[in-house]
Amino acid sequence: THIIGVIVPSVQAHFFASIIHCIEDGLKDSGYRVIIYQSNESVENEINGVKTLLEAQVDGIMASMSLETENVDHFAEIIKQNKPLILFDRVHEDLKVPTITLDDFKAGYMATQHLIDQGYEKIAFITTIHQIKIFNDRLKGYKAALKDNGLPLIDEHLIFGGLSIKDGRFGAGKLMRSKNKPDAIIAGDDFTALGVIKKLKEIDETPPEVGVIGFANEAFSAYITPNLSTIDQHAPQIGKECAKMFLKMVKKENPFQEMEHIVLDPSIIERQSTTKES
């Protein structure tokens, strides 16, 4: 059919929109068109998405999983039909398929180390309650950086909830009311970080007085006040690698013959929200 299905948690996020754009760009010369399906972080929507795309006779599917996804049987159906399946950003270890990911342990470590280098010592982390590999790896990186720098891991500095502006506001409020107030906050993504900044400004703790860093380098992060330090996850490169990988897989009788796992290096974008004036 020369149609590819792409399933993402949300097209509102610039991160995923950028990946989709680069997938489309990378496939257009080969005559492929893309159908986009949004899960909106719901596993039920994701299951329906896989079903709908397979019924549409797509030639393959690329997907980044919803926060709710634990069971991956719906993705196994794609493999059963011998159609290329590529997972990007959010992947699952039970699915033996090609993947394109970021080194998320390094990303968590890098965010934490950056704050420590800026002089922050009581660093909190707001992340998702869901057991998703990328967020677990970032948390492990955070814990490793604290340990390597001789800083204690304080349980009340870990907030597990959702990832949204609302969750950032709630998490920051809870942290700043605690007896052991942090002097910096790592947010699970840039939307959560935006909520953190909004809450901190309300209580006159405007960053970088309390440092804030996010993940994904969303388009808005450079334009809010103060602008947001963030970990760049290199969305365009993820999209390009997805397109290249698919074009290799689709030519093979068994698309899963060679299992390629591409891991990209994160990089840090330092902005006002973590930069203390010397």
Image (cartoon, helix red, strand yellow):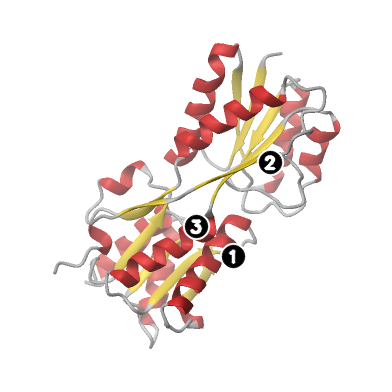
Residue lying farthest to the right in this orientation: 80
Amino acid carrying label 1: it is: Ile
Callout 3: few (<14), some (14-19), or many (20+) C-alpha neighbours within 10 Å?
A: many
Q: Which residue is mark 2?
A: 46
Residue 72 lies left or right of residue 269; in this view the side is right
Residue 241: percent from left, percent from top: 55, 32
Residue 202 lies left or right of residue 65; in this view the side is left
The residue at 27%/69% (across/down) is 118
Provide the secondary structure element on which disc 1 rests.
loop
Q: Which residue is mark 1?
A: 129
The image quadrant that residue 225 belongs to is bottom left
Amino acid carrying label 3: it is: Leu
Q: Quadrant of the N terminus?
A: top right
Near-viewer residue (188 or 68)? 188
147 relative to 98, above or below:
below
Give the total number of marks visible in the rendering.
3
